[in-house]
Image (tube, rainbow, N blue to C red):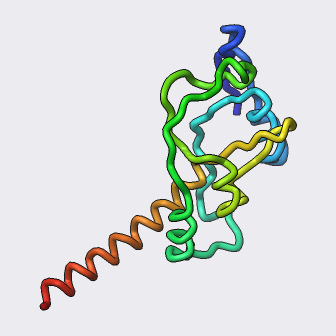
Amino acid sequence: MRFSMEDNKNKALKDYVFGEIKEYDLEKIEAEVLKDSVYLDVFAGSDVAFKNDISALNAQDALSKLSQLQAYNFTYKTSEFPEHNFPQGEQFGFMAQEVEKEFPQLVKKDPQGHSFVNYQQMIPIMAETIKNLNERILSLEEQLKNK
């Protein structure tokens, strides 16, 4: 996979090449992405043929963990961390340190020890939790209807 992205500091395109990697090494790709603070929307290999050790998420456990997280609105300290090319203006998200307590596999640290959250991996957890909550609501509605 090859793509170019504008470097916010230099306003120049920088090439990223991942397709020539013989083995898919997520650690190397994450290191490159964290180094340059590149924010990507990518398609992930999700075909069942690519996966081992498949098990359903425990919705109750996911709900319990998600309930521990606080969502925040904030602005980045863009002048203190210009090398990260953070976006300007109001943002929404979680604090990585809080996410790490509940979902340690979703947090990575850069060489300076700053934490980054893999928000894309939160989607299936949230989807399963929403399904579980919807089932509870439907069950409660049915109980109320039958009274």
**Drawn side of residue 118 relative to residue 71, left or right:** right
- Percent across and percent down for residue 84 are 71, 25
The one of 68 and 147 positioned closer to us in this rendering: 68
Which residue is painted at 66% across and 61% down in the image? 103
- Percent across and percent down for residue 92 are 50, 39
- Percent across and percent down for residue 121 are 60, 53
Which residue is painted at 72% across and 59% down in the image? 104
For residue 63, above or below residue 144: above
- Percent across and percent down for residue 11 are 66, 8
For residue 51, above or below residue 26: below
**Drawn side of residue 114 relative to residue 87, left or right:** right
The residue sitting at the right extreme is 111
Which quadrant does the N terminus fall into? top right
Which quadrant does the C terminus fall into? bottom left
For residue 17, above or below residue 30: above
**Drawn side of residue 64 relative to residue 38, left or right:** left
Which residue is painted at 25% across and 81% down in the image? 140
